Structure formats: structure tokens, C-alpha cells
Image (cartoon, rainbow, N blue to C red):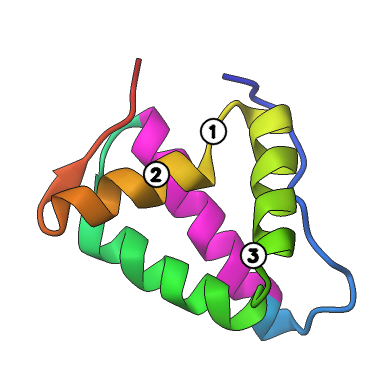
Amino acid sequence: MANNYSYPLDLTWSTDEITAVLHFLNQVESAYESKVDAEKVLESYKAFKTVVKSKAQEKQIDREFEKSSGYSTYQTVKVAQAKGKGFISLEN
């Protein structure tokens, strides 16, 4: 979708926390742009949830990321959870 977009990051996060969030968002991008291992998406989501603990903040990040990139973190995790193992792709 959009080639030049920003990531919804909180500048109060530590470097490790930013890395975990970026890794998860990169997995989401891969699901839309090619394909990605469902287990890796779920692992990165688990690390993401250690940083973003509240559902409200998670939804806010999803909205901001989808608005700027066109990619939904919610849909990616939903598909990965349904698939469990193997590769997923949300390409149109």
C-alpha cells in the first residue's frame, strides 16, 4: 500500500521495547506484502503484548498503523491464530 509511512511508537519505550514492537509490525507488513510464518507472527505478537499491555493501547496502535499503512495488526493476528502453523498471507 503506502510505501512511506510512520510507525506508531511511544518514545518513552526502551530500545528493547521499540525493537519488539517494530518486529511485530514488520511481521504484519510481511503478511500483507508476501507471506509469513503464522507461528512467528504469534511469537512477535506475544513480545508486542509485553510492551503494549492494555487492549485500548493495542487498538490505538492498530488504528494508527492501519491508517498510515493499510495493514491491520488485528486481522493479521486473527488469521495467524486461526492457521496456527504454516504460512499466512493477506495479500489482496
Task: Write down the residue under mark 1.
Answer: 71
Real-space CA distance between mark 1 and mark 3, rounded to the nearest whole angstrom: 18 Å
Going 64% across and 24% down the picture, which residue do you hit?
3
The stretch drawn in magenta includes residue 23? yes
Real-space CA distance between mark 2 and mark 3, rounded to the nearest whole angstrom: 16 Å
In the rendered view, would you say 9 is above or below 59?
A: below
Task: Write down the residue under mark 2.
Answer: 76
Residue most toward the left? 86
Secondary structure of the residue carrying tag 1 is loop
Nearest to viewer (mark 2 / mark 3): 3
Going 39% across and 44% down the picture, which residue do you hit?
76
Q: How many marks?
A: 3
Q: Amino acid at mark 3?
A: Lys
Quarter of the rendering containing residue 52: bottom right
Magenta stretch in the rendered image: 18-33
Could you classify mark 2 by the number of other residues whose Cα lies within 10 Å: few (under 14), some (14-19), or many (20 or more)? many
Q: Amino acid at mark 1?
A: Tyr
Quarter of the rendering containing residue 11: bottom right
CB under 8 Å between callouts 2 and 1?
A: yes
Our reading of the magenta stretch's main secondary structure is: helix
Residue most toward the right? 12
State the image coordinates of residue 23 (x, y, percent, origin top left): 52, 63
Q: Earlier in the sequence, mark 1 or mark 3?
A: 3
